[in-house]
Amino acid sequence: MNRNPYLFEAALKYGLRGGNLDFTTSTTPEFLADGEIECGKATKLCLDAGINISQITFTSDGQGSLPEYDQEGNFKGVKLGKCKTLYEAVKKGIIEENLRLEEIIKVITSNPATIFKLKGKGFIERGFDADLVILDKNLDIDSVFALGQIMVKNKVAVVKGTFEK
C-alpha cells in the first residue's frame, strides 16, 4: 500500500475506517524514484493521521521474487527479496522518522501475529515460540533466537538457510 502515492492515499482512507495496512519493505531505488513511500515515513504519516499502530504491518518479499525493470518499464529479470529488509525498515523508521522502537517493532512482530492469527508467535509469553532479536546500542542485530534456538550470535549467522551463502 506504499508502492505509489495514489495507493497510499487510498490506504490512509481505508486505515481511518479501521482497515489493516501492509507496507512492503522490498524496494528498489527505481520504485522510490517513481513515488514509493518508504515504510517508516508511511507509518509516521499514518500515525499522524490517527491510524493505530496495531493496524500496520510490514512485509518483505523475503526469499521470494522481486521483479526488476529497465527505465522504459521493460522486464529485465528477477532479483531475490531479502528478509533483512524488514528490520532495516524498522530501524530506518526509528532513525529518520523518530518512531519509538517499542511501537514500530510491532509492525513485524505482534501485529502480523494478531492480524493473521498466528498461534504462538509475536509476543514474549509462556508457551510461545521464543523468537527473539537482541539489539546492540546502535540498534544493530546482535543475536537472534528462533524457536528457542540460537540463529545469530555476536552478529554472525550460526544457522544459514537455503538462500544464504
Image (cartoon, rainbow, N blue to C red):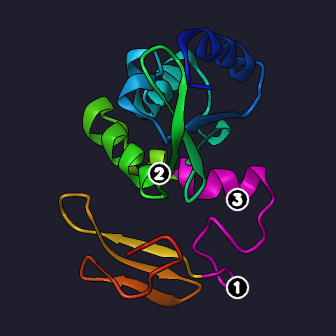
Residue kind at label 3, given as amino acid type: Ala
Q: Answer few, some or many: residues within 10 Å of disc 3's Cα (few below 14, many 20 plus, some between 14 and 19).
A: some
Q: In the rendered structure, are the residues bearing label 1 and label 3 in contact, judged by CB atoms less than 8 Å apart?
A: no
Residue kind at label 2, given as amino acid type: Leu
Disc 3: which residue: 113
109 or 33, which lies in front?
33
Q: Answer few, some or many: residues within 10 Å of disc 1's Cα (few below 14, many 20 plus, some between 14 and 19).
A: few
Residue 19 placement: quadrant: top right
x and y percentages locating residue 14 in the rendered image: 74, 19
First of labels 2, 3 by sequence position: 2
Look at the numbered disc 2 and give the secondary structure of its residue. Answer: helix
Disc 1: which residue: 127
Disc 2: which residue: 86
First of labels 1, 3 by sequence position: 3
C-alpha separation, residue under disc 1 versus residue under disc 2: 25 Å
x and y percentages locating residue 127 in the rendered image: 70, 85
x and y percentages locating residue 30 in the rendered image: 40, 24
